[in-house]
Amino acid sequence: MEESVARRIEGTPQFIELVRKRSSLAWTLTIIMLVIYYGFIALVAFAPALIGQNVGGAVTLGLPLGIAVILSAIILTGIYVRRANGEFDRLSNEIVAANNAAMGRAR
Amino acid sequence: MNRILLAASPLLALGATAAHAADLAAPGAKQATNWTAIAMFLAFVLLTLFITAWAARRTKSTADFYAAGGGITGMQNGIAIAGDYMSAASFLGISALVYGSGYDGLIYSIGFLVGWPIIMFLMAEPLRNLGRFTFADVVSYRLQATPMRAMAATGTLVTVAFYLIAQMVGAGQLIELLFGLDYIYAVVIVGVLMILYVTFGGMLATTWVQIIKACMLLAGATLMSILVLATFGFDINAFLAKAVAVHPKHAAIMLPGAQVANPISAISLGMALMFGTAGLPHILMRFFTVRNAKEARKSVLWATGLIGYFYILTFIIGFGAIVLVMGNPQFVDAKGVLLGGANMAAVHLANAVGGSLMLGFISAVAFATILAVVSGLTLSGASAVSHDLYASVFRKGRVTEGAEIRMSRITTVVLGIVAILLGIVFKNVNVAFMVGLAFAIAASANFPVLLLSMLWRGLTTWGAFFGGFVGLITAVGLTVLSPGIWTAVFGMTTPAPFPYTSPAIFSMPLAFLVCFVVSKLDRSRAAMAERAAFDAQYVRAQTGIGAEGASAH
């Protein structure tokens, strides 16, 4: 891609909107995942007794907690994919279409 | 009973990696030849060779060979990624870890899973939009090709080598145990089949071998878990209570154990697992087999879901083995040690819940799993040599597709032979350690350079080059100074200079720091041009305009 083309696309409102929305979602979800995981590791390292706390019958807190971390990883990924496949792809297609039109005019 | 812990005791906190890559080194008697298992395995081999022949007819261009022509769907690729990730060791090793120390096994599985969302959020799309065949394509997109490809190919080959040694040694030991075949035959069979798949069928055959194996493994593990829970009428409480009552550690199996006692080691290991996944070349390569960024996203969602589900199953299987295998004279010796070693927990459980047919099926699945994982690794090593070093660095891109594929096939054969020899030479090495190292190197050398090249305008060639090599050398160096090598391998009596089990907590931030500082200091004309070229790269990474095989033209 030529730099002039890149700079033109970078200046379009759709591109600015796409990048702003996508990075804010991506970094928010990344931070949530890091907090969940390292929070879990911190509990394991510093409060092991809490992990072994009985929460009903033979089930201890560590089990639902561990499964919740696994599920949160899957759910966070799902949230991202849902928004990206809908909203972000729509924006991205608009940018591509506008670019094709501009390239057509240039030719 | 705690055989896995004893076997890996110098490397206690490396248990995670043990689990992943198969600390299958536990000593044990060779099993009697298992004909059901061999028949099922032969059926798998015939099917996969048939697929290889089919794939070979469709593999003509470099895009076919390295990336299956970009024609894999998101779901197929997701299953194949899960297949790459669920090694025999994940299955046997983590269930063995649960069997030996309960909750620790779950902690490790979680570490292996949480890297996937990060790959999704920060890397999957730009990776797909910028690369063609290898992650070196991405890091050399706007940086100078020769130093960057040399660095990325080195990172790839070192990571692949350690991972491959671990898998080959694990394969030999596992097959010796499961099938009653000699170690050396087992290693040679794995090597030869892997060479056939990759040389003739390229990425297309490798992907389908991976998909079939992933489905077999998931089906087998699901069936075993259902059979285990059915024994207790699906009453989780009764199931757990029985496990706590039977296990010699009793309630302690529901607590974090000795393996995560040191917080710094625990966090360092967590970093290696989480970010190492995002730097494993054979995993990164899978993103180029799909048509566009949308399919790449679907792949990650499928992979994350399947891997998460699989780790929950291994936990049930480990507890199932505590309840149904532990103390059963059919499966343990007079001292209560599992026949064939601690890693056999899941295999004995298969026998306990499903008889010899289930045992044969699970054994065949374990063999198939190793075969599929080594094929993926070899293909990624071969592409680093043929695509990055040969075609781009030595021939400066002046090479025909035919010549590049030929070079790739030759490299595959050479790597296959090298893998067989390494498997034989390193027969007694601690495989857990090798995989720990592979993850730490991937997190310290490949991941920082790849991430910064995609996200940070300021990264220059020399920043990336030095950052990557510093990460690589620090990761290997600190590992040598850690108890795992210093004490266990060199037999030094002085305490290891580096007391932690994983170097990632130091080597990964250091790599980022060097990338940053060297890039900032780089005031050369080339560096200016590289920063200016970021705009074009960024637009392509974000929108896919101009990307290889992208649907949006």
Image (tube, rainbow, N blue to C red):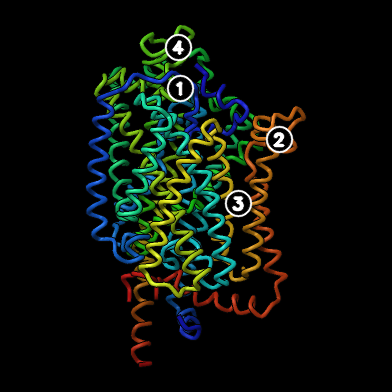
CA distance for labels 1 and 2: 27 Å
Mark 2 vs 3: CB contact within 8 A? no
* Amino acid bearing label 2: Pro
The residue tagged with tag 2: helix, strand or loop? Answer: loop
Quadrant in the picture for residue B62: bottom left
CA distance for labels 4 and 2: 36 Å
Numbered mark located on residue B444 in the image: 3
- Chain letter of mark 4 equals B
Residue assigned mark 2:
B499
Q: Earlier in the sequence, mark 1 or mark 3?
A: 1
* Amino acid bearing label 4: Ala
Mark toward the viewer: 4 or 2: 2
Mark 2 is surrounded, within 10 Å at the Cα level, by few (under 14), some (14 to 19) or many (20 or more) other residues, namely: some
The residue tagged with tag 1: helix, strand or loop? Answer: helix
CA distance for labels 1 and 3: 32 Å
- Same subunit, tags 1 and 4: yes
Q: Position of residue B456 (x, y in %)?
A: 58, 67
- Same subunit, tags 1 and 3: yes
Q: Earlier in the sequence, mark 1 or mark 2?
A: 1
CA distance for labels 2 and 3: 18 Å
Residue assigned mark 4:
B245
Q: Earlier in the sequence, mark 1 or mark 4?
A: 1
Mark toward the viewer: 1 or 4: 1
* Amino acid bearing label 1: Tyr
Numbered mark located on residue B99 in the image: 1
Q: Earlier in the sequence, mark 2 or mark 3?
A: 3
Q: Earlier in the sequence, mark 4 or mark 3?
A: 4
Q: Earlier in the sequence, mark 4 or mark 2?
A: 4
Above/below status of B146 relative to B273 = below
